[in-house]
Image (tube, helix red, strand yellow):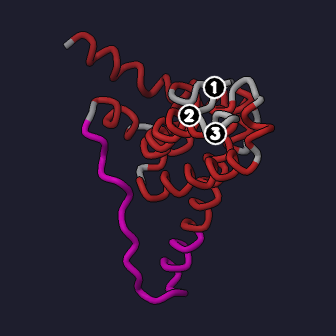
Amino acid sequence: MVTGRRGDPDGYEDFFAVAYPRLVGALVVTLRDRAAAEDAAQDAMAKAFSQWRKVGAMDRPEGWVFVVAVRAARRTLAREERLHRKLADGQLLDVEIPDPLAAIDSDLGVLLDRLTPRERMAVVLRAVADLDLAQIADAMGVKVGTVKATLHSARSKLQPEVTQRRST
């Protein structure tokens, strides 16, 4: 566990300083919406703080925070999807809903844009959050086999592009 600063004997502030930027970055890439990413990250970090004795004693508290944040983001996305359906059905007044964050200005962003949201989430949780398959399944609310298939599908989509970029 990270050693704490004065006034922070349990190390939460040090943990936050390291984990929060990584968490927000991973969620922005996954969700393509900075505000939603920050909301989910803040919710997760608040839960970590309220349970810090337990979370701070874990082998990988950052993994726990990633799982909590992804669950929060999934709930938000589900609510937004319901809202979009109601708008499409004409059940609500005409409301402008902003588009997700513009594509990331990097090769990684271009590659990730080729993936479905589920594939993108699985790849980010594996590569950025360094979660194992069971943790990814838990965060995404699916079975481990689904995570394996999703990651395989993502690799299959990305492999030709990565090979082509390396050869140029």
Is 6 on the left-hand or right-hand side of 120? right
Q: Residue at x 51, y 33 (%)?
A: 18
As rendered, which of 123 and 159 lies closer to the eye? 123
The image shows residue 64 at horizontal and vertical percentages of 69, 36
Residue 132, quarter of the rendered image: top right
Tell me how far mark 1 sits from mark 2, CA to CA: 8 Å
Is 13 on the left-hand or right-hand side of 132? left
Look at the image and tell me in which quarter the C terminus lies. top left
As rendered, which of 49 and 144 lies closer to the eye? 49
As rendered, which of 56 and 33 lies closer to the eye? 56
3 vs 2, front mark? 3
Dot 3 crowding, Cα within 10 Å, few <14, some 14–19, many 20+:
few
> Is there a contact, CB below 8 Å, between mark 3 and mark 2?
yes
The image shows residue 55 at horizontal and vertical percentages of 75, 37
Say what secondary structure mark 2 lies in: helix
Decide whether the magenta segment is chiefly helix, strand or loop: loop
Q: Residue at x 74, y 39 (%)?
A: 138
The stretch of residues the image draws in magenta is 82-105
Check disc 3 and report the residue beneath it. Answer: 8
Q: Residue at x 60, y 36 (%)?
A: 6
Identify residue type, mark 2. Answer: Asp
Tell me how far mark 3 sits from mark 1, CA to CA: 9 Å
Residue 147, quarter of the rendered image: top right
Tell me how far mark 3 sits from mark 2, CA to CA: 9 Å
* Vertical side of 131 occupied by 95: above or below: below
Decide which of tag 3 and tag 1 comes sooner along the chain: 1
Check disc 2 and report the residue beneath it. Answer: 14
Check disc 1 and report the residue beneath it. Answer: 3
> Is there a contact, CB below 8 Å, between mark 1 and mark 2?
yes
Identify residue type, mark 1. Answer: Thr
Residue 153 sits inside the magenta stretch: no
